[in-house]
Amino acid sequence: MKIPFVDLKVQYQSIKKDIDYAIASVIEDTAFIKGKYVQQFEKEFSELYGVKHCIGVANGTDAIYIIMKMLGIKEGDEVITVANSWISTSETISQTGATPIFIDVDEYFTIDVSKIESKITHRTKAIMPVHLYGQMAEIDTIKQICEKYNLYLIEDCAQSHFSEYQGKRAGLFGIASTFSFFPGKNLGAYGDAGCILTNDDSLAEKCRMYSTHGALVKHTHIIEGINSRLDGLQAGILSAKLPYILKWTAERNQKADLYNKYLAGIENIELPKVRPNTKHSYHLYVIKAERRDELRAFLQSKEIACEIHYPTPLPFMKAYEYLKIDKNDFKVVEENQQKILSLPIYPELSEDQVLYISNSIKDFYEV
């Protein structure tokens, strides 16, 4: 049985009429840059999410950078973030001129809040937690720390569309949040795309202006900006998918429950923990496995695709050698680095496929 890590073709086939109609409509109206389809998606996403402003941008990486620039984060500043994210989280900090300050993780793969305050200095301007794999960080505590030290809270929600913490959605706790609509995300475009969410009117206007060459009206440039626009085709595709996202999220949770059922009792693996009083969106289903690399090779031999998110923690990358980081500060993420393995999870994954993957893992450890 061949099982891909993500099957976007099956998803397309399930809503083919909606997608084809959306693409044809954008082409018919030649609304390729900005225009009504972008405006429509921004309105739909903000309303469904329960937030005032949605600013569509070219990708999730730009979303992070734009927020920090418009908050005035600059050279000499520091931004605290987590050690186990994709490099977009930290490289954008560096691009503003600021310095990323990394923190180890907790048992839920998110930033260890107990270690944040010791890293705050007079140069700290913001804390940027990442709700990784669809699991929300301990966001209430982070918000309290930000309020105590007068810091900006920026949420990286690239992997946590519609996750919840105590009934409140990811991305609604801080000054602003960022989302990626990369094709493999829970809500994915057919190319690069992203957005910024905020309830702050002034920040929303600044971000929109900066993302369109510093102009809210064409040829009227108030500031120098960048070119980071959500295009009409991607917006149309996202609007076509949006009515299904809550159903898809529930189905991801159902698949996670099946994994938990069929993988229960295997001593050599640890199943993903879910933080109390939260709703996981399971962008990824990540186990910790003994002899991880051997298991991965075995699963691949059975035509089961699996990945490692992420093989090298950010502080250990060559790009951050200049920070002269003490690896002893990252014992949890260093241990996880040797064990984490992402198994296939998507709404269209069948119970038979989950059972096949689970039995294959059992077979590996019983040999």
Image (tube, rainbow, N blue to C red):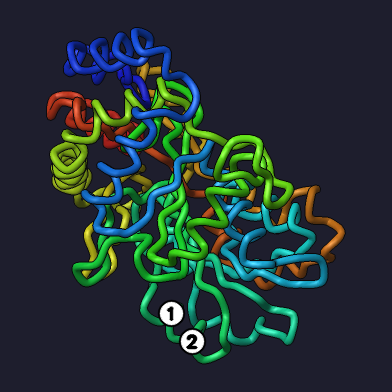
User: Which kind of residue does numbered mark 1 sit on?
Assistant: Lys
- How many numbered callouts? 2
Q: Residue 18's x, y, as percent? A: 19, 17
Q: Which residue is mark 1?
A: 143
Task: Farthest residue to the bottom: give it.
Answer: 148
Q: Which residue is mark 2?
A: 147
Q: Residue 51's x, y, as percent? A: 30, 59
Please rate how many residues cluster around mark 1, counting C-alpha atoms within 10 Å: few if below 14, some from 14 to 19, many from 20.
some
Q: Residue 353's x, y, as percent? A: 20, 24
Task: Judge from the rendering whether residue 84 lies leftward or rightward of residue 213; answer left or right.
Answer: left
Q: Residue 1's x, y, as percent? A: 26, 13
- Secondary element under disc 1, as helix, strand or loop, is helix
Please rate how many residues cluster around mark 2, counting C-alpha atoms within 10 Å: few if below 14, some from 14 to 19, many from 20.
few
Residue 335: quadrant of the picture:
bottom right
Residue 30: quadrant of the picture:
top left
User: Which kind of residue does numbered mark 2 sit on?
Assistant: Glu
Task: Farthest residue to the right: give it.
Answer: 322
Seen at 27% across and 36% down, the residue is 362
